[in-house]
Image: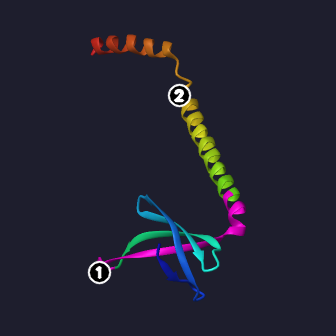
């Protein structure tokens, strides 16, 4: 693969890249190695932005994740994703309960009697 200079001036080798396009954002997962074959991961978020003149540029945010932090990072990410899924399920249940409670007081006998009185009221006009 390709070698690039890192922030500290050492050479880094690109080992693997995974690109994830997600709407207006693109995520890059890059596995890299230093000269000493210490592997690390960079996660880059790239988002297209527009200047006032209409020209575009890419705003990027980068995270460097080192091998000693992989396990803790993966665990925390998994927990956060599970929490979001749980919260979304709870909020959708709350919405369903709210909607259901608004419409459970319907009495179908009332509907029948309303239909029966409407034609009679129309005939008297």
| Of residues 106 and 17, the one drawn nearer to the viewer in this rendering | 17
The kind of secondary structure element at disc 1 is loop
The colour scheme applied to this rendered structure is: rainbow
Does the magenta segment cover residue 18? no
Q: Is residue 37 left or right of residue 29?
A: right
What percent of the width, then of the height, locates residue 6? 56, 83
Marker count (numbered): 2
What percent of the width, then of the height, locates residue 59? 45, 75
What percent of the width, then of the height, locates residue 29? 52, 65
Quadrant the C terminus occupies: top left
Q: Is residue 57 left or right of residue 60?
A: left
User: Measured along the vertical axis of the image, is residue 44 above or below residue 4?
Assistant: above
Kindly indicate the quadrant of the structure image that contains residue 100.
Answer: top right
Q: Is residue 120 left or right of residue 91?
A: left
| Of residues 21 and 99, the one drawn nearer to the viewer in this rendering | 21
> Going 66% across and 50% down the picture, which residue do you hit?
83
Q: Which residues are magenta?
A: 52-74
The kind of secondary structure element at disc 2 is helix
Marks 2/1: CA distance?
52 Å
Of badges 2 and 1, the one in the foreground is: 1
Determine crowd level at label 2: few under 14, some 14-19, many 20+ residues with C-alpha closer than 10 A. Answer: few
Disc 1: which residue: 53
> Going 63% across and 42% down the picture, which residue do you hit?
90
The answer to whether mark 2 and mark 1 are in CB contact below 8 A is: no
Indicate which disc, 2 or 1, sits on the residue closer to the N terminus. 1
> Going 60% across and 80% down the picture, which residue do you hit?
35
User: Measured along the vertical axis of the image, is residue 2 above or below residue 16?
Assistant: below
Which numbered tag is attached to residue 103? 2
Does the magenta segment cover residue 64? yes
> Going 56% across and 35% down the picture, which residue do you hit?
96
């Amino acid at each position: 693969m390709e070698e690039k200079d890192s922030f500290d001036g050492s050479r880094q080798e690109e080992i693997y890249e995974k690109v994830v396009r997600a709407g207006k954002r693109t995520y890059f997962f890059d596995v890299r190695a230093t000269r000493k074959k210490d592997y690390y991961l960079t996660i880059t978020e790239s988002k297209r932005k527009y200047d006032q003149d209409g020209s575009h540029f890419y705003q990027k945010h980068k995270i460097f994740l080192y091998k000693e932090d992989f396990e803790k990072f993966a665990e925390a990410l998994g927990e956060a994703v599970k929490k979001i899924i749980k919260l979304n399920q709870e909020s959708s249940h709350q919405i369903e309960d709210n909607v259901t409670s608004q419409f459970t007081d319907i009495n179908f006998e009332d509907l029948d009697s309303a239909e029966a009185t409407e034609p009679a009221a129309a005939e008297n006009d």
